[in-house]
Image: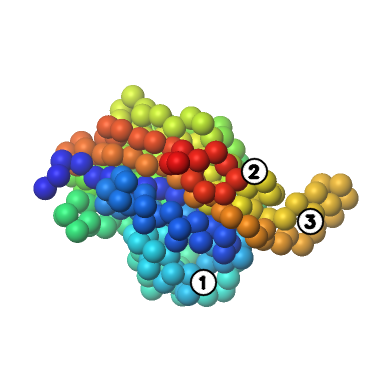
């Protein structure tokens, strides 16, 4: 068995163009980086709002292993059934007790590597009243240990404020293999291996159409800023960019040994060209 596991974490897939970017680029990334495991945030995959049963199947058909969500998890009513019945689709872990579904689960790859995936929702500048993600992290740390209960861990750090994201990243350093940010839809340039071996990036970026308002046409959001009155948001069409974070991890330690910020297709400069 190889000593290493190759993982790709992909930020918020937005609408049809985002899904097409996955279909167009994931196969070549799987080949190029010898990917063993792919986690995608798909909270905006259904026309910008939520997820559907059909899209879950579509993303798994493209070769995705686990889907994470965020504050948009519940935009489509069928989400409740999806997260309840499909253990490969995670909603944020720190929703109150009794919320359907789960936000932390341990999977085993074809090669026998145990990979935990978690999804946490921030509270700063978020309209959701979820439980504290820091206390939720502490509870997970009391219950599970990297190297004992799982070999690797991927955490979707779904926060609005970079201050909250970096601090959540810090409390997971050495306890997760990869802490990838999602939610802001803008990739940050700070991917790094932290002192205890965790691969961290504040936001891995949206997988969707750039030069838009977070994947939506500008007209509605600009008018909303001009008038202060909520406007309808329309998902943008065009070529999407796949944005994500690739990491290579040592199966014995769970630590990152190599990484790359990925941006391919669409409007942003291509790291894979
Ligand atoms: Fe979000
Ligand atoms: Fe999002």
- Residue at figure coordinates x 45%, y 45% from the top left: 244
199 over 47 or under it: above or below? above
Point out the image quarter for the C terminus: top left
For marks 1 and 2 on the same chain, the one whose residue lies earlier in the sequence: 1
Q: Kindly tell me whether mark 2's CB lies below 8 Å from ligand 1.
A: no
Residue density around tag 2, few if under 14, some if 14–19, many if 20 or more, within 10 Å: few
Residue at 51% x, 61% y: name it: 20
Looking at the image, can residue 138 be seen? no
Q: Position of residue 52 (x, y in %)?
A: 51, 72
Under tag 3, what secondary structure? helix
Mark 2 lies on residue: 125
Numbered disc in front, either 1 or 2 = 1
Taking the spot 35% from the left edge, 66% from the top edge, the residue there is: 87
Report the residue marked by disc 1: 52
- Percent x, y for residue 101? 42, 66
The picture quadrant where one finds residue 85 is bottom left
In the picture of the structure, the residue carrying the numbered disc 3 is 220
Kindly give the residue lying farthest to the top in the view shown.
Answer: 195
Residue drawn at 79 percent across, 54 percent down? 219
């Amino acid at each position: 068995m190889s000593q290493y596991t190759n993982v790709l974490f992909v930020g918020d897939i937005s609408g049809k163009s985002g899904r097409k970017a996955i279909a167009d680029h994931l196969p070549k990334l799987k080949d190029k980086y010898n990917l063993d495991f792919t986690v995608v945030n798909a909270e905006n995959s259904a026309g910008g709002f939520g997820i559907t049963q059909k899209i879950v199947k579509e993303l798994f058909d493209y070769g995705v292993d686990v889907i994470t969500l965020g504050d948009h998890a519940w935009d489509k009513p069928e989400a409740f059934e999806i997260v309840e019945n499909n253990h490969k689709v995670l909603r944020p872990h720190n929703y109150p007790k009794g919320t359907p579904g789960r936000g932390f689960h341990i999977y085993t790859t074809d090669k026998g590597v145990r990979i935990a995936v978690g999804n946490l929702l921030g509270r700063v500048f978020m309209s959701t009243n979820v439980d504290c993600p820091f206390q939720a992290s502490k509870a997970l740390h009391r219950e599970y240990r990297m190297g004992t209960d799982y070999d690797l861990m991927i955490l979707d750090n779904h926060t609005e404020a970079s201050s909250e994201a970096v601090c959540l990243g810090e409390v997971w350093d050495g306890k997760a293999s990869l802490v990838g940010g999602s939610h802001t839809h803008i990739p940050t340039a700070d991917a790094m291996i932290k002192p205890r071996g965790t691969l961290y990036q504040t936001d891995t970026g949206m997988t969707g159409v750039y030069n838009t308002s977070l994947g939506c046409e500008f007209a509605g959001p600009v008018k909303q800023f001009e008038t202060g009155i909520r406007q309808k948001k329309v998902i943008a069409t065009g070529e999407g960019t796949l944005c994500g974070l690739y990491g290579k991890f040592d199966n014995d330690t769970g630590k990152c040994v190599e990484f790359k910020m990925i941006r391919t297709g669409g409007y942003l400069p291509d790291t894979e060209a």
